[in-house]
Image (cartoon, helix red, strand yellow):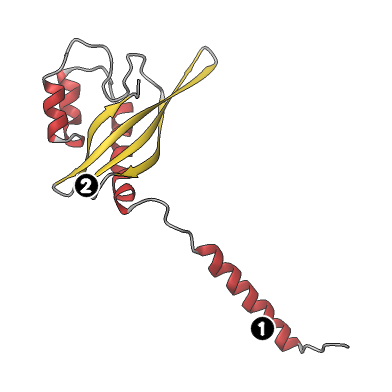
Amino acid sequence: MKFLISKRHLLLLIFSALQLSIFAGCSQPVLESKECISSREAVRSFYSFHFGNDMTPTPENLKKREKYLSKALKERLSEGDTESKSDYFTQTADYPKAFRVGACESAGSDRVTFEVLLFWRTDGKDRQQEITVVAVEESGTWLIDRVDSGE
């Protein structure tokens, strides 16, 4: 048994298959919560600023970062040890060279937790460490509220 398909029907079939593949390829599922999506840029902006400037923990350097910090974190840091060489925001005195904002978990409509990877390259060796960064939304702005090394 032989099937005869006109050129017109064949072109229509090919065109339909192409449209279907395009539409199917364009529908990417949203894997992050809306809180994670809206706060990611704030965390990235803070760490870009932090890495682009002097990371030494001094009152002057803390003041430069205030616009990125929650009220509670500003208070905790202003009461802390100002003589420490360890940077609170990277949890180390050996300042890393680069960072990457990773996975996020939402802990409500105004609190998220990010994994941030820190990278070093010294003496031809690469090293990385993960820290946890908590951001909170205050007055419509996402701010850094806590940083932990997990140690």
Q: Amino acid at mark 1?
A: Leu
Residue 138, image x and y in percent?
15, 44
Q: Please give the name of the residue rendered at 82% of the width and 89% of the height, measured from the top-left corner.
A: 4
Q: Tell me the quarter of the image containing the N terminus.
A: bottom right
Residue in the picture at 77% in, 89% down: 6
Picture layout, residue 119 above or below residue 28: above
| Crowd around label 2: few <14 · some 14–19 · many ≥20 (10 Å) | some
Q: Does residue 52 show up?
A: no
Q: Which disc is residue 86 wearing?
A: none
Q: Can see residue 91?
A: yes
Residue 137 is situated, as x and y percent measured from the top left of the image, at 20, 45
Task: Name which quarter of the figure residue 116 lies in.
Answer: top left
Closest to the camera, between mark 2 and mark 1, is 2
The location of residue 141, given as percent across then percent down, is 19, 46
Q: Earlier in the sequence, mark 2 or mark 1?
A: 1
* SS for callout 2: loop
**Where does the C terminus fall, quadrant-wise?**
top left
Q: Nearer the viewer, residue 36 or 100?
A: 36
- Above or below 25: residue 123: above
Q: Residue at x 55, y 15 (%)?
A: 124
Residue denoted by label 2: 110
Q: Among all residues in the image, which is located at the extreme top?
A: 83
Q: Check the image and report above or below for 95 versus 70.
A: above
- According to the picture, the residue beneath numbered tag 1 turns out to be 12
Residue at image coords 32%, 14%:
93
Image coords of residue 65 (percent x, y) = 20, 30
- Dot 1 falls on a residue whose secondary structure is helix
As shown in the figure, which amino acid type bears the numbered disc 2?
Asp
Q: How many marks?
A: 2
